[in-house]
Image (tube, rainbow, N blue to C red):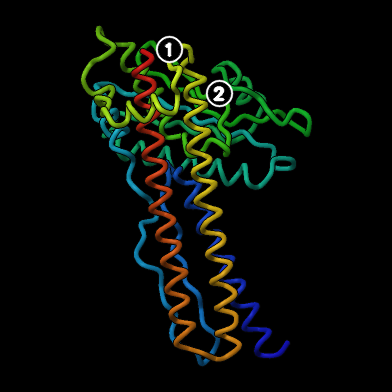
């Protein structure tokens, strides 16, 4: 392999690493919704300028204001049991990676809960663990490929329980909102008034208007169906933003390859900075979409109560 070929391979590997970091952003917008975009940088070939590091982007973004308000209103502990019982031989790596991101999100809840969020993790598959997950209302999957798997959450507050029976990566952008609403419902159910301060923030008029625009026949739409429609809209926005960044990155990769072939050091540095800017902008856009989705789902839940 000649020097130019090695440089092209190096460039492609660097861009792919950036795309993996970008993928982490969209998921962790989860976490959390998004916990951030992995910092990336392109390493120039020997003799080229020094690497240009990515702008400082936090590895973990804080939880949303709505979530922190709910956690701040807790007057007694909420226990979250996290079941990640996965058949290593048949479950796709993407599912395992999603499970790890859920664990990170739960760690954020613990940190922000001021001692009121207790997370119990069950990650070792066994018959006893599977039976416990089933008793908690979790939904088995993977039955057509191997052992029954469980990936879900069971929540308990005082004498109340609730579950998120099957977590799916497709709905990762809505995971924080779903979990926070579940906690808020448990807290509200244990108080005399469902509208007790601290369980939910007031619905901003602009958010309520946006929800009514997205769900014009609100009176005839159930809570669950409305949540599905809002999530669908949020995921469509994520997909559109992701596709736009893919296009920009591919075009930048082509220009970077040409610049390397021409030994244009200054151009390489500028294109690298541009790629880092694209990633950072995408991380911020994803956070904004996630925050907007959570605000809408919170508003819809209150509107239906």
Relative to 148, 219 lies left or right: left
Query: Which residue in the protein does label 1 denote?
Result: 219
Residue 165, disc:
2
User: Is 202 situated above or below 175?
Assistant: above
Considering the image in quadrants, where does the C terminus appear? top left
Closer to the N terminus: mark 1 or mark 2?
Answer: 2
Considering the image in quadrants, where does the N terminus appear? bottom right
Q: Where is residue 215 in the image (x, y as percent from the top left)?
A: 45, 23
| Residue at horizontal 50 percent and vertical 45 percent from the top | 238
Q: Where is residue 44 in the image (x, y as percent from the top left)?
A: 52, 82
| Residue at horizontal 41 percent and vertical 73 percent from the top | 53
Residue 259, disc:
none
Mark 1 against mark 2, which lies toward the viewer? 1
| Residue at horizontal 47 percent and vertical 67 percent from the top | 40
Q: What secondary structure is marked by label 2? A: loop
Relative to 27, 290 lies left or right: left
């Amino acid at each position: 392999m000649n020097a130019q070929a090695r440089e092209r391979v190096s460039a492609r590997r660097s861009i792919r690493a950036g795309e993996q970091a970008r993928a982490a952003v969209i998921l962790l917008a989860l976490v959390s919704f998004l916990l951030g975009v992995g910092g990336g940088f392109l390493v120039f070939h020997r003799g080229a300028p020094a690497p240009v590091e990515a702008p400082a982007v936090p590895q973990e973004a804080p939880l949303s204001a709505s979530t922190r308000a709910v956690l701040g209103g807790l007057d007694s502990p909420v226990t979250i049991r996290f079941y990640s019982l996965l058949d290593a031989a048949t479950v796709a790596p993407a599912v395992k990676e999603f499970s790890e991101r859920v664990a990170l999100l739960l760690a954020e809840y613990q940190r922000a809960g001021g001692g009121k969020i207790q997370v119990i993790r069950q990650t070792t598959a066994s018959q006893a663990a599977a039976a416990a997950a089933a008793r908690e209302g979790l939904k088995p999957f993977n039955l057509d490929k191997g052992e029954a798997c469980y990936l879900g959450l069971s929540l308990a507050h005082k004498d109340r329980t609730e579950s998120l029976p099957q977590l799916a990566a497709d709905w990762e952008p809505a995971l924080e909102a779903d979990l926070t609403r579940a906690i808020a419902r448990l807290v509200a159910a244990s108080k005399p008034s469902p509208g007790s301060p601290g369980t939910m923030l007031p619905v901003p008029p602009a958010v309520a208007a946006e929800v009514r625009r997205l769900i014009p026949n609100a009176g005839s739409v159930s809570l669950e169906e409305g949540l599905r429609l809002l999530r669908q809209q949020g995921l469509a926005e994520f997909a559109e933003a992701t596709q736009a960044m893919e296009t920009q990155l591919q075009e930048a990769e082509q220009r970077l390859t040409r610049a390397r072939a021409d030994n244009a050091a200054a151009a390489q540095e500028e294109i690298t900075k541009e790629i880092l800017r694209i990633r950072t902008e995408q991380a911020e856009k994803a956070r904004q979409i996630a925050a907007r989705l959570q605000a809408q789902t919170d508003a819809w839940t209150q509107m239906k109560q």
